[in-house]
Image: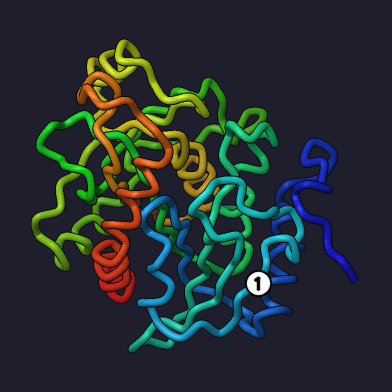
Amino acid sequence: MTTPSSAAVNFDSVDPFALADEAAAEIARLSGVQRHDIALVLGSGWGDTADRLGETVASIDNEQVPGFAKAAVAGHKGTIRSVRIEGTDKHALIFGTRTHYYEGRGVRAVVHGVRTAKAAGCETIVLTNGCGGLNPEWAPGTPVLISDHLNLTANSPLEGATFVDLTDLYSARLREVARSVDPSLAEGVYAQFRGPHYETPAEVRMAKTIGADLVGMSTALEAIAARHVGLEILGISLVTNAAAGISEVPLSHQEVIDAGKEAAGRCADLLSQIVRKL
């Protein structure tokens, strides 16, 4: 039986939590793993982490799982992997791509992976991304822990009178675990813009004025949804380029891909070591 991908699912006409339950059940059936412990969403530059983390129990095409679709961005992998974390009895659920808000599928599709992770049994989620850096000291290839975010999408994954405290959205405990692996890790505030166009220099100056250190097109909406369902969140950005106006070099997606490839090994080693300690 063919299960519906997000290309076939009208998220506005379904209960998003019931769909997440269906997706988790299908992942369990296809992987043979009834419960996962930790989820990872791998953004630009982080894609090799699954190979360093442990034994891949199953690799599932996104389109086999209800609500998921093939990767829409070059350099991302359209698979969901179940990995037995080396040295532990835990399993990681690894999303090789995400649905971005700018794809036009709606916020429910954007956070479907997060809700599926919770339905699959996960208690912790690691949200990674490639981003533009506002701090000139952070050269391309620098990993930065996310301490907080600015949601500049003018939207939310929460619907109705759903009031959720975001005071400590990105776990201080998990950031300390990350620093136990690499004490040099910096941290900063991530601003999610809607995309898919890059920010203008004026928008970057605005973001910096209101407190941003990093800018990108993902993560914040996912983090809100993750807090809502009770997941503990670790956010890590990879600075792939200086944001518009910080550098005189024009921005391009190829630059993001190239920087991600160059840093892939280091990022994968770092993140796999961190995940083993979570």
When the figure is inspected, residue 154 is found, relative to residue 128, above or below; the finding is above
The picture places residue 205, in percent across and down from the top left corner, at: 26, 15
Judge by depth and name the residue closer to the eye, 43 or 242. 242
140 displayed left or right of 29: left
- Residue under label 1: 60
Which residue is drawn at the image coordinates 45% and 57% (left, top)? 42
Identify the element where label 1 is drawn.
strand
Please state, as top left, top right, bottom left or bottom right, where the N terminus lies in the image.
bottom right
Judge by depth and name the residue closer to the eye, 100 or 173. 100
The picture places residue 22, in percent across and down from the top left corner, at: 76, 63
Judge by depth and name the residue closer to the eye, 259 or 16. 259
85 displayed left or right of 30: left
Which residue is drawn at the image coordinates 85% and 39% (left, top)? 13
Which residue is drawn at the image coordinates 32% and 61% (left, top)? 264
Q: Amino acid at mark 1?
A: Ile
Judge by depth and name the residue closer to the eye, 96 or 248. 248
